[in-house]
Image: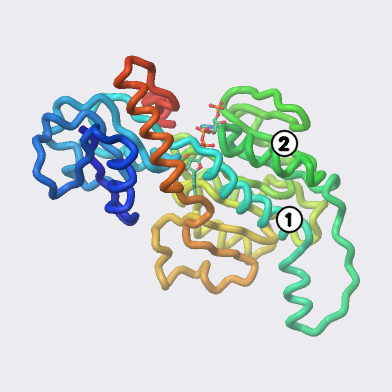
């Protein structure tokens, strides 16, 4: 039996779609009449503290999100495989966000927007894409998709990951020892890392001050599409104010929803979106997880299983 436990998304719609796809395999929601011992799979997003109580025969946890940081911290998470969402539609949405914000900063949107407000005709010509280096932190599913979409636009690309990567057209850096070298040639820093104890707070003032300063005249920019826990918002406010950063695009925040009192709301060169860069699609999600569940029931291995030791 599959149990759905979703917060902040339309659980009923997902349950209906799963029931249709998996029938006669049984699908239930919280509040339905079922024996927890009969639940073999649980599909979760933002699970409540008691989400896993009584699920003594669980075979796997299926995560609606690509990011599993919150799930990894759940005190009741059972010792069974956690399968995360990997999906072309989600990757496309995330890359759409990255491409939009990278090109915006590359073409000096902040500067021309300010000029327009001042009714100022100042013919500054932005550098061509090849002269602008986009540094992507995280070279997994989403980082590699972003590369595929940014490369044809002509940007110079570099990546930073935990283990070394060889990707055509991308200069790869890996590990803490190569982090500063990676930053020193980066004009637009894109974050697509998972949130783990090692990556928490990585978008801080020290990091910003190591970015390349002589290419984009407005100063280097950051684009955070991963998790709010990666960024120190007080440091972003400071860096945007003193010119260490020229602009910041933030889709995620330390506290979500972003409190009304946050100074970020009022900063002109800070571009805020409410964690909408990518959202798991119901149709592709139901197909993906149903296939995994049925294959597993037929004796096949689970795919895209989170490494509990690494935390992603
Ligand atoms: P992924 O496939 O697991 O890739 C993670 C990448 O980060 C890997 O390249 C990994 O290096 C690297 N990495 C991990 N820890 C590192 C460290 N300490 N130092 C350097 N590199 C490190 O993850 P993904 O599918 O691309 O997703 C990335 C994140 O995007 C998710 O975790 C989630 O938080 C976020 N996300 C956000 C939204 C949104 O709407 N804003 C939507 C979906 C996902 P190795 O390759 O060497 O292992
Ligand atoms: C969304 O933030 C996800 O992790 O899929």
Q: What's the distance in space between the residues labelled 1 and 2, CA to CA?
A: 16 Å
The image's colour scheme reads: rainbow
Counting labels gives 2
Q: Residue furthest bottom?
A: 119
- Determine contact: label 1, label 2, CB under 8 Å: no
Closer to the camera, 221 or 205?
Answer: 221
Crowd tier of the residue under label 2, counting other residues whose Cα lies within 10 Å: few below 14, some 14–19, many 20 or above: many
Closer to the camera, 151 or 220?
Answer: 151
Q: Earlier in the sequence, mark 1 or mark 2?
A: 1
Q: Residue at x 38, y 22 (%)?
A: 302
Q: Quadrant of residue 8?
A: bottom left
Closer to the camera, 231 or 80?
Answer: 80
Q: What residue is shown with label 1?
A: 103
Q: Say which element carries label 2.
A: strand
Quarter of the image with the N terminus in it: top left
Q: Residue at x 63, y 34 (%)?
A: 144
User: What x and y, as percent, mark residue 27?
Assistant: 23, 39
**Left or right of residue 307, residue 101 in this image:** right
User: What x and y, as percent, mark residue 203?
Assistant: 55, 48
Q: Say which element carries label 1.
A: helix
Q: What residue is shown with label 2?
A: 158
User: What x and y, as percent, mark residue 271?
Assistant: 59, 64
Mark 1 sits near ligand 1, with its Cβ under 8 Å away: no
Q: Is residue 272 above or below residue 99?
A: below
Quarter of the image with the C terminus in it: top left
Q: Residue at x 73, y 76 (%)?
A: 114
């Amino acid at each position: 039996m599959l149990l759905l436990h979703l917060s902040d998304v339309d659980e009923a719609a997902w349950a209906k779609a799963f029931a249709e796809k998996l029938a006669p395999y049984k699908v239930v929601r919280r509040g339905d009449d079922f024996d927890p011992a009969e639940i073999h799979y649980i599909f979760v997003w933002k699970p409540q503290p008691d989400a896993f109580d009584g699920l003594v025969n669980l075979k796997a946890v299926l995560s609606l999100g690509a990011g599993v940081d919150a799930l990894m911290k759940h005190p009741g998470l059972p010792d069974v495989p956690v399968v995360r969402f990997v999906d072309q539609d989600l990757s496309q949405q995330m890359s759409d966000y990255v491409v939009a914000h990278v090109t915006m900063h590359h073409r000096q949107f902040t500067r021309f927007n300010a000029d327009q407000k001042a009714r100022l005709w100042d013919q500054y010509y932005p550098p061509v894409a090849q002269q602008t280096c986009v540094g992507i932190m995280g070279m997994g599913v989403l980082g590699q998709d972003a590369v595929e979409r940014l490369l044809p636009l002509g940007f110079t690309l570099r990546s930073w990951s935990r283990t070394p990567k060889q990707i055509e057209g991308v200069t790869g850096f890996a590990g803490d020892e190569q982090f500063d070298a990676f930053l020193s040639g980066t004009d637009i820093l894109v974050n697509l890392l998972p949130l783990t104890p090692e990556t928490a707070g990585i978008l801080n003032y020290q990091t910003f001050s190591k970015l390349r300063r002589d290419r984009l005249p407005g100063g280097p920019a950051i684009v955070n599409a991963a998790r709010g826990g990666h960024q120190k918002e007080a440091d972003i406010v400071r860096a945007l104010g003193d010119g260490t950063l020229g602009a910041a695009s933030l889709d995620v925040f330390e506290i979500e929803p972003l409190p009304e009192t946050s100074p970020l709301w009022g900063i002109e060169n800070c571009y805020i979106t409410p964690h909408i860069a990518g959202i798991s699609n119901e149709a592709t999600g139901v197909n993906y997880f149903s296939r995994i569940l049925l294959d597993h029931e037929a004796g096949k291995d689970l795919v895209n299983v989170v490494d509990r030791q690494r935390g992603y």
